[in-house]
Amino acid sequence: MTEHFLANHAGDPKRLDRVLRDRYPNASRHAIQELIAGRHVQVNGRTVWLASWKIIGGDKITIAEAPATLPVPLDTFDPAWIIAELGDIIAVNKPAGLLSEPARRDDRGSLLELANSALGPVTLFHRLDRDTSGVLLLTRGGSINQRLARAFSRHAVIKEYVAEVTAPNRLDAEGTIITRMNTDPQRRDRMVVVSKGGQLAVTHYTRMDDPAGRTWVRLRPDTGRTHQLRVHMAHLGAPILGDILYGDRDSAPRLMLHSHKITLPVDLFGEGAFFTAPLPTEFAPMP
């Protein structure tokens, strides 16, 4: 299927990858990069394979044989995303490729925006990277916001992730990663491990091997730094598959990281409660 459209932004030129992300707000960075690198994009009739190619308003962009990894833009909240509701807490299963909330003023199409339209005013209590799927917590406001904020601040909310990684021989059966992290001074979209400064980042992991030779890890972060799990796995020499920033973009069709389970502290509702997001099809079979 071939699609044609005109760049409609005004002012300064934009990078080609940025224009395509605006066009397909729920597409992952990996999918956009693959689209361009695969020479599926033409600008004013000329094939372009550089993500940094500058686009001005009025340029004609043609996408030929767009791969299936580039989804149709989402413009509505799918009720099937709701895992459960507990009081004023709403647990949802965020799809991969969808922003948790707008990262920039011109970002369109995020889980928070779609949820606000469908459910009324809600608050997003934590974020997942665009390419990470799984459990996210929303609230309807009121006293639950303060109570949940206190639970997060004292690390009483347990978040468990599942990831597929490379280089299994680099990982012990289980372990704890303790580092400090800061923004990469050379690339503002990346985080790096630093010896001084930055913020403390702590992740616990358990390795799971399967007969097919795939290596999975269960990850439990004590802290919530940007890209923490992705940076920590790469730091151990076992990057998460499909990670365009910290690993090999060609190793999987998507970032193989999923927020699988969130457990609330017993004192929040008088009893323990947890929310689980089913594993995506790309994760099957998993031990």
Image: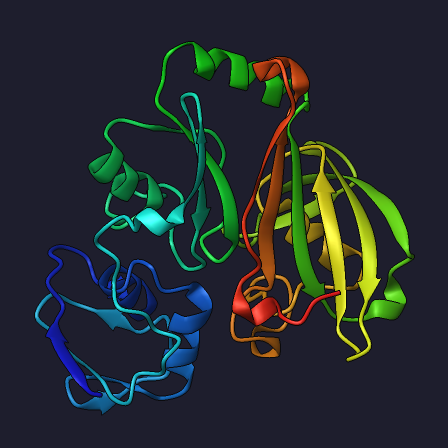
- Above/below status of 188 relative to 120: below
Q: Residue furthest front?
A: 271
Q: Is 133 displayed left or right of 36 in the figure?
A: right
Q: Is 52 displayed left or right of 251 in the figure?
A: left
Where is residue 119, by image quadrant? top left
Q: Nearer the viewer, residue 133 or 90?
A: 90
Q: Nearer the viewer, residue 199 or 249?
A: 249
Residue drawn 12% across the image and 75% down it: 5
Residue 48 pos. (x, y %): 30, 84
Q: Is 107 displayed left or right of 234 in the figure?
A: left
Where is residue 222, by image quadrant? top right
Quadrant including the C terminus: bottom right
- Residue 95 visible at all: yes
Residue drawn 55% across the image and 55% down it: 278
- Above/below status of 45 relative to 97: below
Count of numbered labels shown in the rendering? 0
Q: Is 45 displayed left or right of 148 in the figure?
A: left
Residue 283 pos. (x, y %): 61, 67
Residue drawn 40% across the image and 87% down it: 38
Residue 26 pos. (x, y %): 33, 59
- Residue 128 visible at all: no
Task: State how the image is colored.
Answer: rainbow
Quadrant including the N terminus: bottom left
- Above/below status of 213 relative to 98: below
Residue drawn 67% across the image and 43% down it: 160
Q: Nearer the viewer, residue 62 or 59?
A: 62
Residue 2 pos. (x, y %): 19, 87
